[in-house]
Amino acid sequence: MELLCYRLALFLILLSTGGFIVYVVKQKKIVYQYAYRILLGGFVVHGFYLVLQFHALGTAPVITLKAALSFFSWTIIGAYLIFHIKFKLMILGSFISPLAAFLMIVSSSIPGKEIVVKPIFKSVWLTLHVGTIFIGNGIFAITFIAAVMYLIQEYHIKYKKFGSFRVSKYTGSNTVFLSSNSAFRNSRTFSPGKTRFSKNATLS
């Protein structure tokens, strides 16, 4: 049962990663919506797998490197889903999902082995401590990736480089989004030293 949940979670996360990549290329909102829902499904299945692991081990499933990478992937996705409720950053998923998929792939490539958990590791306080550390690291990963996105959009604004896609910012709400070539040209104009947004700018 645990192995089935793990493989299903990995499959769903990989599938959502493919969807987010297609969204970056095609700029179809419906593609993003499906990718987001698949990622949410993968998060739920992965969470159920972790519950089974916790029940079997009696402690947080981070005893081995294989388990720790899997749990970290779950916390990153969870942090993104919570972040998305507040900010609705569709492009952020195109960065988060591949990272989570990479961690899951590395985790799955590590051979599993029988785990003997010492009684000292079954403390409730240790479980809470380790859990909050991983959750904090997941939130940190989100902020780091958001900072990278900000640097990318600043580079495009400074050098006026328009490729197949670009990250841009709506300063009024600190929202980062992905815009296509036409949307980018219609939603902003450049002037020396600053960027102005037109009133009909569309957040996708």
Image: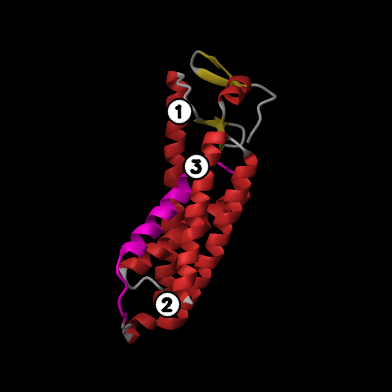
Q: Quadrant of residue 68?
A: bottom left
Residue 98 colored in magenta in the image: yes
Residue ID for mark 1: 154
State how the image is colored.
Answer: secondary structure
Q: Residue at x 46, y 75 (%)?
A: 2
Q: Is residue 16 left or right of residue 131?
A: right
Which mark identifies residue 21?
A: 3
Q: State the separation of the CA atoms marked 1 and 2.
A: 43 Å
Please state the extent of the stretch shown in magenta in the rendering.
Answer: 88-115
Identify the amino acid type marked 2: Trp
Q: Quadrant of residue 172?
A: top right
Q: Quadrant of residue 171?
A: top right
Q: Residue at x 49, y 70 (%)?
A: 5
Residue 69 locus on image (x, y percent): 37, 62
| SS at mark 1 in the image | helix
- Secondary structure mostly seen in magenta is helix
